[in-house]
Amino acid sequence: MFIMMAVGFICGKVKLITPEVNRGLANLALMLVNPFTTFTSYQRDYSDEIALNLVYTFGLSLVAFAIQIPISILLIRKSRGEYPIERLSILLSNCSYIGIPLVQSMYGRDGIIYLTAFVTVFHLVTWTYGLSLMSGERNVKKMLRNMVSPALVAVLLGALCFFTRIRLPEIVLTPMLRIADMNTPIAMLIAGSTLACTDIKRALTRVSTFVICALKLLLMPLIVLAVIFSAQRFGVPSDIINVVMIAVSCPTATIITMFSHRYKKNSVYSSEIFTVCTLFSVFSIPFILWVGTLVGL
């Protein structure tokens, strides 16, 4: 996958993928490919095991965010000028663009269906706590309206089909699966070309960027791991815990930069954090998973 990211980086540098093309790819992934990937992962025969594992994943995801939100508030004080960006940068992970390809490569469609539970909690946190933090607004109706995204709709429709045992005919499902197969290549091209458009030298000279990335890529995942690894004692499979850990360990989410643009925050700083986190996640994600094996995952 990281070779695909390198290809995206090269394409960005030689202007084969321009910023306009990159935005188009991002919209395609967000509005079509990711939702199809999510929805098709639910197109399988119902089983009590999968249903129970979905409940486990949803519960562990809630625990993960319940741990991280107060820690982000404790670590990033309001006295810091860019505290909304920094708090969200160590809280929200790129669990769709980066997480789905990683989980798919390790666990196939079984992993994706469980990751959708984490993505659901991610959307709930992003469009409530995250939105209010960046915008300063407390409009509940607006938050609920913003939560209705293609990704969340795909989760709800997919789960509905799974639990009610509705299977689409092959003539409809096959094209959807072909589109879903585009997810990993497109996601890696987007990540690579985004890195190519960022002033990496400037990003690597800001000390606070490294501090935020260390908190996001190392401290937060290790704290979450220290809490949820013991879920095995209650019958939670290690694969489920690993899926949650992959999602938590992903670099900071791209939506933070989008929020920064929309609410006139420091979008340059948020994009620099995204760039450095994405670069170092190549090493940090395998490290976190390795630590997981040491504790018996």
Image (spheres, rainbow, N blue to C red):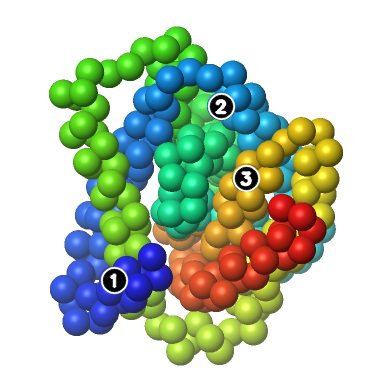
Q: Given the image, on which type of amino acid does mark 1 rest?
A: Gly
Q: Residue, x 40% and y 70% (percent of image)?
A: 2
- Of callouts 3 and 2, which one flags the residue occurring earlier in the amino acid sequence? 2
Q: Is residue 93 visible?
A: yes
Local crowd size for mark 1, using a 10 Å CA cut-off: few (<14), some (14–19), many (≥20): many
In the image, residue 253 above or below residue 55: below
What's the amino acid at mark 3? Asp
Label 1 – label 2 distance at C-alpha: 35 Å
Q: Secondary structure at mark 3?
A: helix
Question: Residue at image x 49%, y 75%?
Answer: 279
From the viewer's perspective, is residue 52 above or below residue 111? Answer: above
Check disc 1 and report the residue beneath it: 8
Residue 155, above or below 132:
above
10 Å crowding of disc 2: few (<14), some (14-19), many (20+): some
Locate residue 246: give its quadrant: bottom right
Q: Earlier in the sequence, mark 1 or mark 2?
A: 1
Image quarter where the N terminus lies is: bottom left
Residue that mark 3 sits on: 239
Check disc 2 and report its element: helix, strand or loop: helix
Provide residue 188's location: percent of width, then percent of height: 35, 63
Q: Which residue is mark 2?
A: 50
- Residue drawn at x 74%, y 40% as measured from the top left: 63
Where is residue 77 drawn, in percent x and y?
Answer: 77, 62
Identify the amino acid type marked 2: Ile
Q: In terms of image quadrants, where is residue 84?
A: bottom right
